[in-house]
Amino acid sequence: MRISALAERTGVPVATLKYYLREGLLPPGAATARTQAQYDETHVERVRLVRALIESASLSLAGVRQVLAALDDPPASWHDLLGAAQHALLMDEDQRAGSSRPSGDQPDPWVDRATRLVRSRGWDCDEYDTLVQRLGDQLRAADAAGVVFTDDLLDAYARGCETIAAADVASVPEGAAAAMRQVVVGTLLADPVILTMRRLAQQHASAEVAGASGEGGTASATPG
Amino acid sequence: MRISALAERTGVPVATLKYYLREGLLPPGAATARTQAQYDETHVERVRLVRALIESASLSLAGVRQVLAALDDPPASWHDLLGAAQHALLMDEDQRAGSSRPSGDQPDPWVDRATRLVRSRGWDCDEYDTLVQRLGDQLRAADAAGVVFTDDLLDAYARGCETIAAADVASVPEGAAAAMRQVVVGTLLADPVILTMRRLAQQHASAEVAGASGEGGTASATPG
DNA sequence: GACATTGGAGAGTAGCACTACCCAATAATG
DNA sequence: CATTATTGGGTAGTGCTACTCTCCAATGTC
């Protein structure tokens, strides 16, 4: 199929596809001549993947590049695989949010709290560093904004995340190279799903509380 | 305090504060003369809030504006309050990710699946519309990217989110206007926290599985 | 042979979040 | 009262991202 067919199949304009080709997000088609190339189903899939990462997981192009690199060069072990996926993600998020890591050696109380939280859950692998740092940063930011996360609340988050993560890990077919896609892309695309579900669950929980306490709030229709 | 003092207290450059003033993210200080105004602690708090929403929750300025508007004009009931918070969020996220809502009346299988999922959890309030739509969109995007979310997986997500949301709702002081801050800002700032925790829990879970199955992967150190 | 299409590349665009600069009015200081 | 620094207010410019447009000669197709 030619580029215009690829554009039709995916709903992405030809100009954008050319851009992706230039940026290396899309591998070049099999050149049949100097100004002609053939694209196949793998290209369709890749374009759809790129679009999903951009639109749903809201990755930047740089982030997409990282993820694709990880996909094209799958690490050996399960664990490294997850690490690679997370690394790709971290890179991207760090870029868009200037993480003001003081990088000093003095003990940061927020990172401490994050560490204690993680420990209390029994999550005491090594190499958490980046993620725990990140968690500490987020707790600090929340505090600066005047929001209090109680220990109970964070503990509930941790329990909820354990449920989620256990299912994540269980859902991956063992050892296959196809697992990579599931882990990397699944992790990324599940993020927004989880957040949306949280909102839904909040609505449900708040409705229950409201109902129980006889709250008569004006139930405004969801704005269009 | 003058604007330069505000800049020092918050670590935000004066030029940026002026920009925020112009954009209405920061209320003007009490003018003591035509070219002088006094700022107080509420301004410090607001600046920190804005920064947290931008850096941690990675909202756009437009999103921050929405959130602040909701904060300044708190709805009467608990439930509406949450709705306002979520509305503000949706606006923002919809802007940055062009939600390709077909808006047709034909039944969308993905939205259907989302609806069934929500129903099966007993979350059958009204006015879920936007969120369920959103969930359907996300499931469709994942499918397009070739990622399969099994029913079991989504159910586990839902259970995890129930845990989280129950804690969210329980953590809010009843009926106070201060609750608004906790709900709106807490919801937003907790999002990244939850995602980070998910990553941590995944690491933990994958390490356990790897350990159990005798996996000998090269445990690369987390890249700095 | 006529004409649309292609690959390749450069340049241009729009939006976002600042950032720099300028101005007259004012405050602070001596 | 003179001097200097700072302020509010505004305009314009910056850097970045993700496209989008335009051009070209080579090619495929009829």
Image (tube, coloured by chain):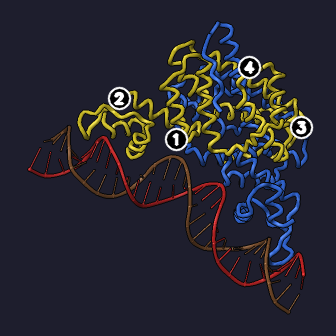
Chain colours: A yellow, B blue, C red, D brown
Chain-order first, disc 4 or disc 3: 4
Rendered residue at 59%/29% (across/down): B112
Mark 3 = which residue? A214
Q: To which quarter of the image does residue A7 belong? A: top left
Alpha carbons under labels 4 and 3: distance apart: 46 Å
CB-based contact (under 8 Å), mark 4 and mark 3: no
Say the numbered circle drawn on residue A125: 4
Chain-order first, disc 1 or disc 2: 2
Rendered residue at 76%/34% (across/down): A135
Chain-order first, disc 1 or disc 3: 1
Question: Does residue A196 appear to the left or right of C3 in the view shown?
Answer: right
**Observer able to see residue A179:** yes
Give the mark toward the camera: 1 or 2: 1
Count residues near mark 1 (Cα–Cα under 10 Å), then give few for <14, some for 14-19, many for 20+. some
Mark 1 = which residue? A61
In the rendered image, which quarter contains the C terminus of chain B?
A: top right
| Picture coordinates of residue A4, whole percent (x, y) | 33, 40
**Between residues B74 and A177, which one lies in front from this camera angle?**
A177
The amino acid pointed to by label 3 is Gly
| Picture coordinates of residue B140, whole percent (x, y) | 54, 31
| Picture coordinates of residue A12, whole percent (x, y) | 43, 41
